[in-house]
Image: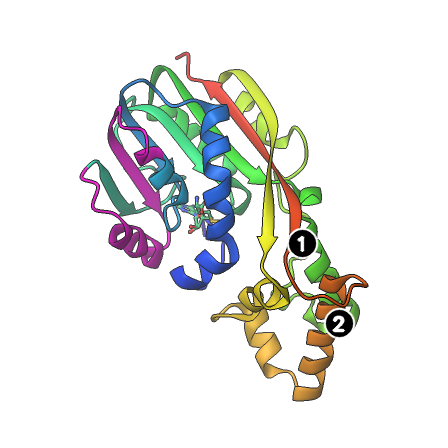
Amino acid sequence: MPSNFVAKGAQAYEASMGRWSQRLAAPFLSFSGVPPRGRVLDAGCGTGSLTLALAAHPQLEAIEALDFEQSFVEALRSRTTDARIRVRQGDVCALPYEDRMFDGAYSLLVLHFVSDADRAVREMRRVLRPGAIGAAAVWSHDGMPSWRLFWKTVLALEPEAAGNGVPSGRRPLTAAGELREVFERVGFTGVTETMLTITMDYANFDDFWRPKVYGQGTFAAFFDALPQARRDRLCGGLRAAYLSGSQDDGPRGFASLAWAVRGTNDA
Ligand SMILES: C[S@@+](CC[C@H](N)C(=O)[O-])C[C@H]1O[C@@H](n2cnc3c(N)ncnc32)[C@H](O)[C@@H]1O
């Protein structure tokens, strides 16, 4: 299995993550750089946050987007009429492209889900022309305060949720230097790492908690199967955590961090 990502459908993805990857896409591209012309790759495009940010660069002639999840491929196709964009289903560990055909290759919030990230980054480098940039970003494990607040509260009230959709432990590559080491190991040169910051803004408590229990994911199934009294208790605990001592339900913003790396293919 080349992926540890559990897809819950395109709509659920947009509510729980796509809205944040849209925010991350522009600073990620500012850091990575976009070539002055040519063809670029979005490896692990999901529902297209980065693909559409790339499409905002009129100098690009072709944008290839690839994802393992067919429902995301279809969702992205339905979101754009840009003739430069081509979306296909595939595996980032076995890219269906010829050597040296891209002027830039990007991967946003994907590599911490890929079973063999070295292989995926080696594939990104293989398809790049000499001198072209490859870049990737993943969330920082310690840099997701709203998610940590949510999962810690769930585990405190429902310990059985461990292994039922609540992430256990730290995902690979989510600590300082880990993504950079992969890029260096597979032969990228001039590898640079930075930390990107976005704010995850929630309109109110509902906006904070509903996306996590929406859809067909493992945690949603766990939550749905709880007796009503335990669901109410969990909801009450999460509300208290979100309000954090205030009586006012309303907007909250959580600064959230991602590690980003870029390197050049000098081969
Ligand atoms: C958190 S999402 C990020 C999607 C998109 N890049 C974004 O920023 O919104 C992770 C994506 O990686 C894709 N993915 C995971 N492993 C993959 C693999 N081996 N090949 C292709 N796509 C993969 C998943 O299907 C999912 O769409």
- Tell me, yes or no, if residue 109 can be seen here: no
Q: Where is residue 106 in the image (x, y as percent from the top left)?
A: 41, 32
Magenta-highlighted residues: 54-83
Instruction: Classify mark 1: residues with Cα within 10 Å, few (<14), some (14-19) or many (20+).
Output: some
- Residue 20: percent from the left, percent from the top? 52, 48
Of residues 208 and 247, the one nearer the viewer is 247
In the image, farthest residue toward the front? 248
The quadrant holding residue 143 is top right
**Which quarter of the picture shows residue 87?**
top left
The residue that mark 1 highlights is 146
Within 8 Å: ligand 1 and the Cβ of disc 1?
no
Q: Gap between marks 2 and 1, in whole Å? A: 14 Å
Secondary structure state at the residue bearing disc 2: helix
Task: Classify 10 Å Cα crowding around label 2: few (below 14), some (14-19), many (20 and above).
Answer: some
**Of pointers 2 and 1, the one earlier in the residue sequence:** 1
Residue that appears at 65% across and 62% down:
250
Element at badge 1? helix
- Does residue 209 lie above or below 186 as drawn? below
Left or right: 56, with 24 as reference point: left
Q: Is the CB of the residue bearing disc 2 within 8 angstroms of ligand 1?
A: no
> Is 85 displayed left or right of 41 in the figure?
left
Q: Where is residue 122 in the image (x, y as percent from the top left)?
A: 44, 28
Is 76 magenta? The answer is yes
The residue under the point 35% across, 55% down is 72
Q: Mark 2 points at which residue?
A: 237
